[in-house]
Image: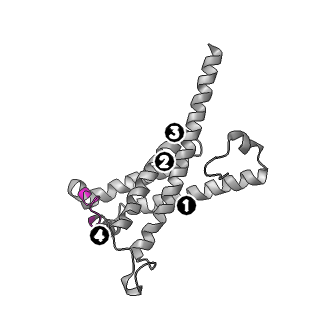
C-alpha cells in the first residue's frame, strides 16, 4: 500500500526506529526551511521599489490578479503581498509547536502558492528563442518552484488537520470518560 494513501499513525511513528524518526524530522525541518526562507526573503523585498517594479509585469500579465492594482495601487499591492508572505512564514515556524499555526500556515501557504503557480498559465514561461518547452524563461524558472512549495503547504495543512482531529477526538473521549 502507498504511504500517500495511509499516513503513519502516531503509534507507528512512536514505534519507528530512531533513524527513521530522525529522517522524518530532518525532512520536515528542511521542507519547512524551503518554504520559510523564500517567504521571508521575498516578503521583505516586497517593501522595496525594485520589487514593486518587478511585480508589475507579473501581476498585469495575469488577468485574475490585475485588479489588485486598481484597488491597492502598485506599492499597496506589493506591501499587502509582503505582509501576507511574512505572516505566513512566521506561522510556518510556529507550526512546530502549534497545530493552529500549522492550520493557518498550511492554508495561507496553499493559497499563496496556488495563486503564484496559477500565473504559469497566463505568463510567457517558455523560452521561444531556445525552441519553447521545456526551456523555461527566467519568469518560468522563478515560478515553477511554487508548485513544490504548494505541495509542502498542503502537506503541513493535512498534517495539522489530522493532528487537530486527533486532539479533538481525544478531548471528546476524555470528556465522555469524566461524565
Numbered disc 4: secondary structure: helix
**Image coords of residue 61 (percent x, y):** 28, 67
Q: Residues within 10 Å of mark 1 (few under 14, many from 20)?
A: some
The residue indicated by pointer 3 is 100
Span shown in magenta? 60-68
Q: Is residue 29 above or below residue 173?
A: below
Numbered disc 1: secondary structure: helix
Name the disc covering residue 105, or none. 2
| First in sequence: mark 4 vs mark 3 | 4
Quarter assignment of residue 120: bottom left
| First in sequence: mark 1 vs mark 4 | 1
**Image coords of residue 158 (percent x, y):** 54, 45
Q: Nearer the viewer, residue 70 or 150?
A: 150
From the image, give the main secondary structure of the stretch colored magenta: loop
Name the disc covering residue 22, or none. none
Q: Residue at x 77, y 54 (%)?
A: 19
Q: Are marks 2 and 3 in contact (CB under 8 Å)?
A: no
Which colour assignment does the render follow? one colour
Q: Residues within 10 Å of mark 2 (few under 14, many from 20)?
A: many
**Image coords of residue 100 (percent x, y):** 51, 39
Amino acid at each position: 500500500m502507498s504511504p500517500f494513501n495511509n499516513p503513519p499513525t502516531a503509534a507507528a511513528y512512536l514505534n519507528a526506529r530512531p533513524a527513521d524518526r530522525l529522517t522524518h524530522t530532518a525532512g520536515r525541518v528542511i521542507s519547512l526551511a524551503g518554504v520559510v526562507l523564500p517567504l521571508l526573503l521575498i516578503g521583505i523585498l516586497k517593501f522595496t521599489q525594485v520589487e514593486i517594479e518587478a511585480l508589475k509585469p507579473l501581476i498585469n500579465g495575469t488577468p485574475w490578479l490585475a485588479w489588485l492594482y486598481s484597488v491597492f495601487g502598485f506599492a499597496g499591492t506589493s506591501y499587502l503581498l509582503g505582509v501576507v508572505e511574512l505572516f505566513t512564514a512566521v506561522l510556518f515556524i510556529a507550526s512546530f509547536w502549534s497545530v493552529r499555526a500549522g492550520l493557518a500556515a498550511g492554508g495561507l501557504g496553499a493559497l499563496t502558492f496556488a495563486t503564484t503557480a496559477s500565473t504559469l498559465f497566463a505568463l510567457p514561461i517558455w523560452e521561444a528563442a531556445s525552441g519553447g518547452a521545456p526551456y523555461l524563461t527566467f519568469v518560468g524558472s522563478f515560478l515553477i518552484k511554487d508548485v513544490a512549495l504548494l505541495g509542502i503547504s498542503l502537506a503541513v495543512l493535512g498534517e495539522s488537520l489530522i493532528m487537530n482531529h486527533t486532539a479533538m477526538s481525544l478531548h471528546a473521549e476524555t470528556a465522555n470518560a469524566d461524565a
